[in-house]
Amino acid sequence: MPFNVVRNDITKVKADAIVNTANPKPAIGDGTDRAIYEAAGKKELLTLRKNIGDIAPGEARETQALRLKAKYIIHTVGPVWRDGKHGELAILRSCYDNSLELAKSLGCKSIAFPLISSGSYGFPKDKAIEIATHEIESFLKHNDMKVTLVLFDKESFVISGPKFRDIVAYIDQHYVEEAREKEYVEYPYGSRRRERLNDFNIHYDKAKLSLPEDIEDFIGQQGLTFQERILKIMEERGLEGTDVYKKQHLITKKVYSDFKNNRDYHPNKYTAIAFCLALELDLDGTLEILNSAGWTLSSSRKEDLVVRWHIAKGDYKISSINATLKSVGLKDLDQYKQ
């Protein structure tokens, strides 16, 4: 099942369980806690919350969801940020771990989290996002559940520090108009770009080749299809289908079945990229696979440059890519499904 990061009001999200950043005492707090009480029914929810009693930091307890679009509200108490040296990181990890395990025990198929402790509790947003994504992805390696991380404000998408500066510099360096570089083919009878990334410098090999007179000879030059290339890589690495379509839950079982049973399977760009991420291909390998499906990661498109940057860094997590896309004001990878 997928892990998504969205910008929304968590009280409007539909899921089996919605996580509340609760007050440790049976009282209404600020921020997300207050918003959930008001949306669910303040008086009724407070009565249910009093039945639980105190909740220790890192622990999780459930109540009915009342008027929310959910079955349960999972109340967890996040840490107040001091300096990162007083167990704050471990407590925040426990909030996610215990909430996920509780949702699992309740039979939930989906759960929505706010960015715990990043509001009035002062937890740095970049650290909060890093912990949230790590704990959620670790859980999903062994469990099937749709998990949504709901960020309320635009600021939550901002990636601070060297990573943010690196990605902006990379885009600025490589974002070029398509007309600036005329593309040619390294293979006979086509026109595609051969792209190399060495220390973030792109080099182009160009060649002009004429078409054969006989169209059958021309068609006969077809190389391996997208499906054949992927299966070849899987065979070389000793991978099974489950190793691919369960990796980060990027690819559904149905999509993989359609791919496996059709030599001429043609994926949309999202699926093509998802296979490359699941196989953790380097940039050259990714571009080769995408080309076999009629796609590329263009230097003239900022979204593509973000994907290229992550692959070049060896970061294949779709949640990280989506967070970076949003941090620089771009749409997430779902845009490639169209």
Image: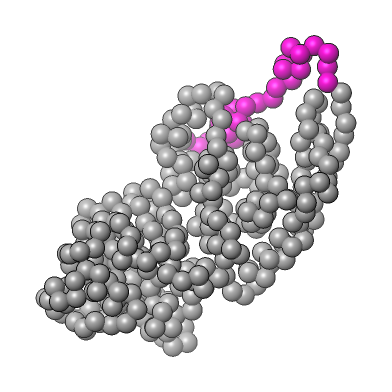
Residue 270 rendering spot, x and y as whole percentages: 54, 43
Whether residue 127 appears in this view of the structure is no
Count of residue discs:
0
What residue lies at 74% left-to-right and 20% top-to-bottom? 221
Is residue 311 positioned above or below 261 on the image?
below
Judged left or right of residue 297, residue 73 is: left
Q: Where is residue 70 in the image (x, y as percent from the top left)?
A: 24, 59
Q: Which residue is rendered at x = 83% and y = 13% of the image?
A: 213
Left or right position of 321 against 48: right
For residue 225: magenta?
yes
> Residue 275 falls in which quadrant of the image?
top right
Drawn side of residue 286 relative to residue 210, left or right: left
Residue at (63%, 54%) from the top-left corner?
A: 303
Q: Is residue 337 above or below residue 7?
A: above
Q: Give the range drawn in magenta.
A: 211-240
Left or right side of 266 for 94:
left
Residue 17 location, x and y as percent?
A: 26, 60
